[in-house]
Image: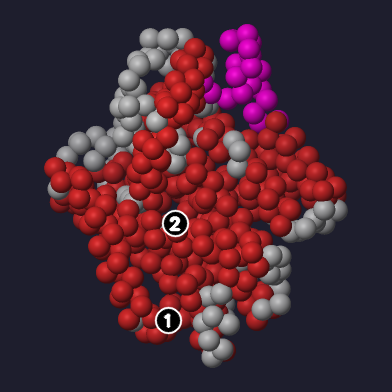
């Protein structure tokens, strides 16, 4: 076992091949991000020169990589110093200070930048008010197009004796707290307390999460509940208690997929984690069964409601096929478009979903090269921007590019560029078997899952938000290992 593994008491990666493949995949994602960020930034300022955006991205990425190479030793000392501060006494005190700092920054943000609900936020609030009034859950005759999870949560929260903006901000502060402490505990379980504290600091200061605090955003709910679901699922086997934690994990995950159905196949990553942990098939089944039961308890009533209304099985929502076709047709741009080449808007929602999948698959089969080019651009949209909070707060309603918005968008993306650059530096300087434990592999699989989904479906920066805590854990693990290697003077690749 490596020194890093002994330090945390965690299992190393069970296979050198898996570790090398994981390393290579993360390097690819990091390089793609370093190209994508300047490419999309170029489009913001010079949209008429869109064809040059990827060339600009490649040039900027090569420039950053050259700086990393030339200054690699100095950067190593800076990274080591950054991860050294939580190793001192009073780790718990530092964690609470981090939590309060994040709380204070969010309070200041929502006071300085009040938000008027628009687009998806306005729709979810409208649905929540319908539920409070005892009305049917539907929009313009669409009974299952909008997933119900977030509207149900809002309908409970808005019953509190608070003004709506205050209620939304209070809910988001609760979700922030849940994300931070669940992220800390998950990082601590996977790699130790120091990694947990660094991950908590990143979560507290992450601009896209901080700047979304005043927005009625389902993304913050998904971030918190998905992190908690993984935390409960990965509790070490303790006999009967395992059934309780895995059932709790399933309950949280059920709430996640009722809010964002694209995460429905995420349990594949949890299954892979169990297999990598070498639990044995019998124990894997025993662990997954209560998880499935918990998820079914949450999702089941909504599925029954859909079956009663449509007379056929609709697990959660009917928007999948239409979204799939809008993302895969001759008019597709990679991001959101109002319609495809064939307009499905006037069809019954079930028929629109069925035909959407049919037409989308037909286009992919007939145009494989166009599909691959479009998939790459979807990956650029997924990784090339992290200013969702700034956009929703400052530009969604006005649709104007103000200096304040440009500044905050720039700060958000500078942070995004910085964390990916730091992660790339760490994974290049640390050998794969040292870096990859089963827990780190699970964090990578979470990121890779949504990257893969939105290489096919519609893409944008908001779709990577659910896995930000897992990315924070990967980065924290890397910088902490750099610090250990520097201390031990054993070389950064030993």
> For this view, does 16 lie left or right of residue 340?
right
- Which sits in the foreground, 270 or 139? 270
> For this view, does 117 lie left or right of residue 100?
left
Mark 1 or mark 2, which is nearer the start of the sequence?
2
> For this view, does 188 lie left or right of residue 328?
right
Vertical relation: 109 (above or below) 309:
below
Q: Position of residue 376 (x, y in %)?
A: 38, 45
* Residue at image coords 43%, 78%: 79
Residue holding disc 2: 29
**Would you say residue 381 is visible in this rendering?**
yes
Residue holding disc 1: 76
Q: CA distance from mark 2 to mark 1?
A: 21 Å
* Residue at image coords 73%, 41%: 291
Residue 230, numbered circle: none
Are the residues tagged 2 and 1 within 8 Å (C-beta)?
no
For this orientation, the residue located farthest to the bottom is: 489
Vertical relation: 300 (above or below) 198:
above
* Residue at image coords 69%, 65%: 15
Which stretch is magenta?
A: 297-319
Q: Mark 2 falls on what kind of element?
A: helix
**Would you say residue 133 is visible in this rendering?**
no
Which quarter of the rendered picture does the N terminus lie within?
Answer: bottom right
Q: Is 300 inside the magenta-drawn segment? A: yes
- Which sits in the foreground, 432 or 167? 432
């Amino acid at each position: 076992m490596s020194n890093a593994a002994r330090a945390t008491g965690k299992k190393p990666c069970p296979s050198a091949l898996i570790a090398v493949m994981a390393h290579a995949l993360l390097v690819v994602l990091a390089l793609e991000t370093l190209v994508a960020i300047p490419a999309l930034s170029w489009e913001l300022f010079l949209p008429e020169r869109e064809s040059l955006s990827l060339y600009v991205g490649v040039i900027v990425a090569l420039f950053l990589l050259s700086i990393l190479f030339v200054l690699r030793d100095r950067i190593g000392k800076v990274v080591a110093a950054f991860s050294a501060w939580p190793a001192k006494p009073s780790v718990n005190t530092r964690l609470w200070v981090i939590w309060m700092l994040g709380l204070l920054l969010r309070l200041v943000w929502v006071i300085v930048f009040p938000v008027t609900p628009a687009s998806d936020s306005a729709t979810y609030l409208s649905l929540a008010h319908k539920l409070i009034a005892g009305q049917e859950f539907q929009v313009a005759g669409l009974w299952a197009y909008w997933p119900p999870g977030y509207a149900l949560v809002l309908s409970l929260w808005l019953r509190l004796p608070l003004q709506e903006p205050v209620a939304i901000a209070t809910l988001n502060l609760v979700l922030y707290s849940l994300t931070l402490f669940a992220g800390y505990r998950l990082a601590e379980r996977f790699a130790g307390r120091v990694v947990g504290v660094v991950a908590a600091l990143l979560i507290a200061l992450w601009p896209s999460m901080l700047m979304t605090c005043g927005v009625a955003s389902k993304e913050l709910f998904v971030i918190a509940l998905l992190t908690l679901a993984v935390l409960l699922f990965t509790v070490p086997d303790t006999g009967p208690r395992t059934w309780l934690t895995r059932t709790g994990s399933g309950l949280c995950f059920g709430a996640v997929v009722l809010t964002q159905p694209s995460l429905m196949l995420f349990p594949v990553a949890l299954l892979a984690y169990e297999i990598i942990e070498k639990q044995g098939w019998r124990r894997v089944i025993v662990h997954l069964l209560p998880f499935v039961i918990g998820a079914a308890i949450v999702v089941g009533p909504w599925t029954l409601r859909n079956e009663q209304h449509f007379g056929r099985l609709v697990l959660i929502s009917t928007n999948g096929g239409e979204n799939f076709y809008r993302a895969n047709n001759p008019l597709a741009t990679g991001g959101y478009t109002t319609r495809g080449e064939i307009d499905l808007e006037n069809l019954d929602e079930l028929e629109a979903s069925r035909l959407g999948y049919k037409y989308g698959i037909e286009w992919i089969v007939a145009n494989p090269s166009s599909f691959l080019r479009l998939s790459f651009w979807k990956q650029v949209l997924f990784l090339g921007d992290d200013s969702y909070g700034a956009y929703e707060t400052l530009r969604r309603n006005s649709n104007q590019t103000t200096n304040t918005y440009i500044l905050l968008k720039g700060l958000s993306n500078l942070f995004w560029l910085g964390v990916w650059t730091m992660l790339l530096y760490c994974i290049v300087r640390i050998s794969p078997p040292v870096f990859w434990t089963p827990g780190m592999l699970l964090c990578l699989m979470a990121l890779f899952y949504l990257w893969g989904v939105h290489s096919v479906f519609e893409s944008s920066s908001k779709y990577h938000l659910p896995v930000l805590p897992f990315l924070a854990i990967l980065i924290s693990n890397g910088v902490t290992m750099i610090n250990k290697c520097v201390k031990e003077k054993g070389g950064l690749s030993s």
